Amino acid sequence: MSKIDDAPVFTPYTLGELKLRNRVVMASMTRGRARNAELAPTDLHVEYYRQRATAGLIFTEGTWISPSAIGVINAPGLFSVRQVEGWRAVTSAVHAEGGAIFAQLAHSGAVSHPDFFNGELPAAPSAINPGLKAFTSDGFKDTVTPRAMSVEEIAATVADYGTAAKNAQDAGFDGVELHSAGAYLLPEFLNSALNIREDAYGGTAENRTRIVLEVLQAFIAVWGPGRVGIKLSPTLTMGGLGPTDKTIDTYDYLVRRLNELPLSHIQIGRFPSDLSGTPIAALQDTIGYYRARFHGTLIANFGFDGTSANAAIKSQQADLVSFAKPFIGNPDFVRRLREDLPLATSSPETYYQGGPQGYIDYPVAP
Ligand SMILES: Cc1cc2nc3c(=O)[nH]c(=O)nc-3n(C[C@H](O)[C@H](O)[C@H](O)COP(=O)(O)O)c2cc1C
């Protein structure tokens, strides 16, 4: 066995119920190729994910749990029969290559636009405009002031998450990851500036985290232990969604509760900038901070390369490392790491939109 084959990222790993052949994970990427009225995965998706199936584990692009969860043009869902069929073709292709794949289930919350809902307002924890952009069929548009969800609507949304998790099972996935990162619905609930509710879903860490824990319970009811994970981004700053003086307490509470659940993993990003002087200065070493607090599998993300990924696993800071952008231009990213081959660059203009070009036409290394 060569030195590189011995490298930490190439050692197998048991993630919950799954045996992964390496620790190089493909992180979720919205790529905007479900260009059909049903928002169903197509042959393009089958080929895209098949090409990347040598990853130890793939997370799909953020996938809508219901029509009211939509917030990006041409991103697929998991709420209709055609979508389940489309995803089944994807999971079959990945499994035929010996890979593993989780569906990432998403609701865009306030980072959506009335254009997706026949002019109706998007749903969010509170009627506060996050001040971001939504990617619509007419390009990027400013977000609007959303409507606050009723308690009944929260219950219905949790049920939608559960149905989507069941659909993911029917589609042949190996598990599901809850998208609680970026500026979507669940991080909005966790954020004390965007969630000013005075009911059981706002006001305290216990209340702000309630919906996240209810959704995870709904997932676990479908999938059982070791097949459900969550992606978190406590350090994220986007528009009105910045850290507050409640961020650390909220996520500390959440992680304590996550330790009580039979999760497969948490996935969490490093933070590239200086946090000193902010309310979350203690999260500068984000991975180390949550490593010390979360007792299960930790997948580290953000800006890793082979060297830093091996170092993170070797030092036991992380169990697995996920990569997003490197997988766009390098379908054979795992082989390139293994053989120390140069990495191709990719074109940002086709990251979120387009057809086959910039999606399935990146060549493997010679
Ligand atoms: C084109 C693109 C689309 C993305 N879409 C998602 C998504 O749907 N869900 C998600 O959790 N993160 C998404 N991300 C964030 C990535 O999963 C990842 O966290 C981030 O790119 C940092 O990893 P990297 O430095 O290896 O690229 C996206 C990133 C890119 C570049």
Image (spheres, helix red, strand yellow):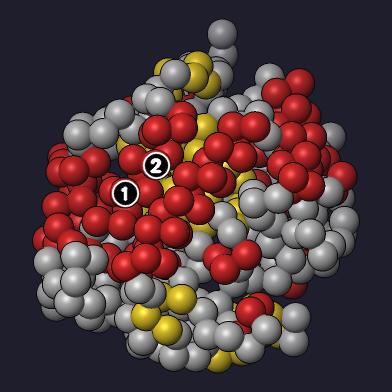
Amino acid under disc 1: Glu
Residue 145 placement (x, y as % from top left): 44, 90
Secondary element type, mark 1? helix
Seen in the picture, residue 66 relative to 22 is either above or below; the reply is below
Residue at (33%, 81%) from the top-left corner? Answer: 126
68 and 23: which is toward the camera: 68
Give the image quarter of residue 340: top right
Q: Give the farthest residue toward the top.
A: 1
In the rendered image, the quadrant that contains the C terminus is top right
Residue 76 shows in this picture: yes
Seen in the picture, residue 52 relative to 10 is either above or below; the reply is below
Mark number displayed over residue 214: 1
234 and 366: which is toward the camera: 234
Q: How many marks?
A: 2
In the rendered image, the quadrant that contains the N terminus is top right
Residue at (24%, 58%) from the top-left corner? Answer: 209
Q: Residues within 10 Å of mark 2 (few under 14, many from 20)?
A: many
Residue 196 placement (x, y as % from top left): 22, 80
Residue at (47%, 45%) from the top-left corner? Answer: 162
Residue at (37%, 25%) from the top-left corner? Answer: 225
State the residue position of label 2: 218
Is 103 positioned to the left or the right of 276 in the image?
right
Mark number displayed over residue 249: none
Seen in the picture, residue 93 relative to 151 is either above or below; the reply is above
Q: Residues within 10 Å of mark 1 (few under 14, many from 20)?
A: some
Residue 221 placement (x, y as % from top left): 40, 33
Are dots 2 and 1 in contact, CB under 8 Å?
A: yes
Is 273 positioned to the left or the right of 25 in the image?
left
Find the distance from the CA under tag 2 to the CA under tag 1.
Answer: 6 Å
Amino acid under disc 2: Ala
Residue 306 placement (x, y as % from top left): 50, 39
